[in-house]
Image: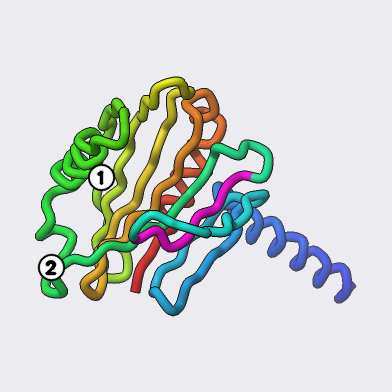
Amino acid sequence: MFRSLISILLIVLSITLSSCSVGVSGLKSYVNPAKGYEFLYPNGWIPVDLKNPSAGVDVVFRDLIERTENLSVIISDVPSDKTLEDLGTPSEVGYRFLNLVKNNPNLEIDSAFLRAESRQANDKSYYLLEYEVDVPDQPQRHNLASVAVSHGKLFTFNLSTPESRWETVKDTFEVAAQSFSVR
């Protein structure tokens, strides 16, 4: 009888714990203690070996099968006394990022800014930014970014996928973007 009760309790506990993880199944954890950030990323994604990365690019992952689906973390300097709110509202920061891309003479990109939100976690502010991106001679893309400031650094966590896959991956991307955190 005691074993039956223990078995039932273990089954209930296992069902309860698995139901608590709905929405995050199939995600792995990445932690960079030296740079002070972490995030969840989709299972089946692999790190990209960065031989000559663009300025500030710290890490890049891509899907093993859908090779154009990727994420990156870019770290830039900001004055050490600045907060994310000092840089502007979520919409202002989102439009500033959009204008930086659109005004780059080396890129022929047309982008649409879709949404901007803010959230608080562990005494830090985060902005969630969503874009559609058109690059000539390539399929339209969908990007989701989480932005934060910590210790004089601006951290940008960006996920990107072909627009044709957005509906399939958007829930996973939302969880991954919301998981991004800095110390």
The picture places residue 34, in percent across and down from the top left corner, at 43, 79
Tell me which amino acid carries mark 2.
Lys
Location of residue 159 (image quadrant)? top left
Between disc 1 and disc 2, the foreground one is: 2
The picture places residue 11, in percent across and down from the top left corner, at 77, 61
The residue pinned by badge 2 equals 82
Q: Residue at 24% x, 35% y: name it.
A: 105
The picture places residue 80, in percent across and down from the top left corner, at 16, 74
Q: Residue at 75% x, 67% y: name it.
A: 9
The residue pinned by badge 1 equals 117
- Residue 26 in view, yes or no: no
Tell me which amino acid carries mark 1.
Glu
Q: Is residue 143 above or below residue 164?
A: below
Quadrant of image for the N terminus: bottom right
Left or right relative to 47: residue 81: left
The picture places residue 111, in percent across and down from the top left corner, at 29, 28
Mark toward the start of the polypeptide (1 vs 2): 2
**Image mark for residue 49:** none
At label 1, counting other C-alpha atoms closer than 10 Å, the crowd grade (few under 14, some 14-19, many 20 or more) is some
Quadrant of image for the C terminus: bottom left
Name the residue nearer the viewer: 115 or 103: 103
Q: Is residue 69 above or below residue 45?
A: above
- The region drawn magenta spans 56-63
Name the residue nearer the viewer: 5 or 54: 54
Q: Residue at 48% x, 44% y: name it.
A: 173
Location of residue 73 (image quadrant)? bottom left
Name the residue nearer the viewer: 66 or 136: 136
Q: Residue at 76% x, 67% y: name it.
A: 10
**Marks 1 and 2, Cα distance to the nearest angstrom?**
19 Å
